Amino acid sequence: MPRALVQLLLVAGAVATAALVVVYHTLPPAATALAGTLPPTIVLGGYHIHSVRSDGTGTVDEIARAAHDAGLAFIILTDHGDGTATPLPPAYRSGVLCIDAVEVSTNGGHVVALGLNDASRYPMGGEPVDVIEDIHRRGGMAVVAHPDSPKPELQWRAWDTPYDGVEWLNADSEWRDQSNGHLAVVAARLLLRPPETIASLFRRPTPTLRRWDGTLRRRPVVGLAGLDAHANLAGWPRYVDMFKTLAQAAVLQEPLTGHAAEDAAAIVSALRAGHTYSIVRAFASPAALEFTAENGGAVVHMGDWAAADGTLTWRARVPEAPGARVVVIGEGREIARGRGSVTYSGPAVSGAYRVEVTYPPFSMPWIVSNPIYVGTPADEGPVDPPPAPATDALDVLGSSAWRVERDAASTGQLDRDGGALRFHYALGPGRPASPYAAAVVPVDGTSGFDRVQLTARSDHPMRISVQVRLSGAGGGQRWRRSAYVDEQVRTIVMPLSAFVAADRPTSQQPIVSVVRELLVVVDTVNTSPGARGTIWITAAGLGHAQADSMASGRDTPGVLWLPERGARPARRDE
């Protein structure tokens, strides 16, 4: 062998050895195995997981086996989709309860739909507020996914919507702002100490926690830690390593029974109610968090409400970790701290109170609880009134100028059915062709109006896009607002302030004086290519709101209120 080649190999070997020594001596600390076990009413699971059904690499069975090997009791699968696929029924696989959810893409970011009753009759998509409305209509819980991802297109941009939960931590987001050089070192460490290396990338997500605390000042919101596991980098990070890194604990009323449907309902109910906390297992485990508030002998737990009366005594404790730093946070600020436990008494001030626990030597939170709320559900804050019905409305239903617009592959037909305008549509095949069909009528915006009011029904549940088109070059810019319709006749009130630009992004609002057309559109945002059906429009008008009609119209049967942009809709129990 040539001497030069031998020297080159010796140098390469020395460099590799030195690199391994550096990597070995800079490994993060091994996870601490704490004494004790979790009570049977606290079960650990993995939330936000992708399989081969979307952009993951593992089958459901393979992921379940990995979860079993990591000691988890349940997993929540969140493959990308539009909600039209029937969720997999809950099932135990390799002794792990598998619960199916879906991650939906909206115009304002991604949202996880958990606990859906069934498949949607139409694709969920478009504006975040509409997707969340559809999730709620189907009995689900809407959780904002990777809200502050370093990747702009993955960030959540609709903080004024009525989401139910937020991922305070997303493991997939934590590596995206690292340099390639650092990731190369991380890759080497990953071979030696995988869970701890993944967790070494975690930093306290202060902006996301601030957003969560800010929302908690107005209403309850559940915080979850999302794995966002894919195992799509040549199988790394492996599912089993992700499961050993981060877990979501569900605090149940009773131990799991072994009956999949019953147990899945219990876990989803616990998450929905905020009876849950997150734990970075790569720091230390197991960990049973005890967090209560006591007032006059009444003790409440995470997710529940304490009366805003007299004095509250807060207690938080991690029995297995006496050296951990335990902090109680109320209204976004620290109110008490301790080592291993904390007890604090003070006035019962309305608000949301949660716990963060750090485990030495780490600064990243080890455990994050969900809040205990002080007050009553009615104390969530003022609810913005619904938009008022249009008064002095310009009726356009009777116009003889209604016409159909469509793409070349779609069809549409308008005719009269008694007092209704009947619109038959059939979309062409193929999403790349962007098939659509629209019923269009000219309007006169010079008299001014601030809302569109439509009374309609359809032959099956669907979403229509109600649009206004302005005069101008190229056909004029359009603004749109989606509305749900089904077999029931309903009146839909849509303030122009709730419309968003349809053609190009803009923060401007439609200029009413140059609105020249009203459109009722069926397109592939919420309708599958090749779909056909019928819509009946029994009233259509443009008008104004009057202050004295705000309250009177609120309880009108069959009226769907679409809130102003940025307004907080009324709670679903109102």
Image (cartoon, rainbow, N blue to C red):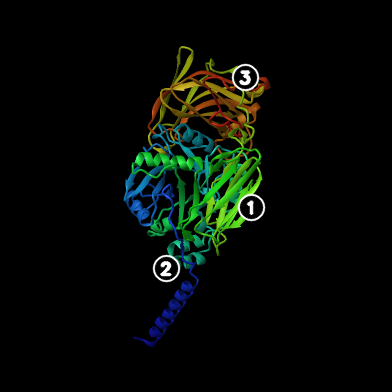
- Residue occupied by mark 2: 192
User: Which of 300/550 is in front?
Assistant: 300
Q: Nearer the viewer, mark 3 or mark 1?
A: 1
Residue farthest toward the bottom in the current orientation of the protein: 3
Q: How far apart are labels 2 and 1 at the CA level? A: 38 Å
Quarter placement of the C terminus: top right
Q: Residue at 58% of width from left, 49% of height from top? A: 315
Determine whether label 3 and label 1 are within 8 Å by CB: no
How many numbered discs sit on the rendered protein? 3
Q: Disc 3 vs disc 2: Cβ atoms closer than 8 Å? A: no
Position of 265 relative to 206 (above/below): above
Q: Which residue is identified by label 3?
A: 552
Residue beneath disc 1: 336
Q: Secondary structure at mark 3?
A: loop
Q: Earlier in the sequence, mark 2 or mark 1?
A: 2
Q: Position of residue 544 (x, y in %)?
A: 64, 22
Judge whether residue 138 can be spotted in this image.
Answer: yes
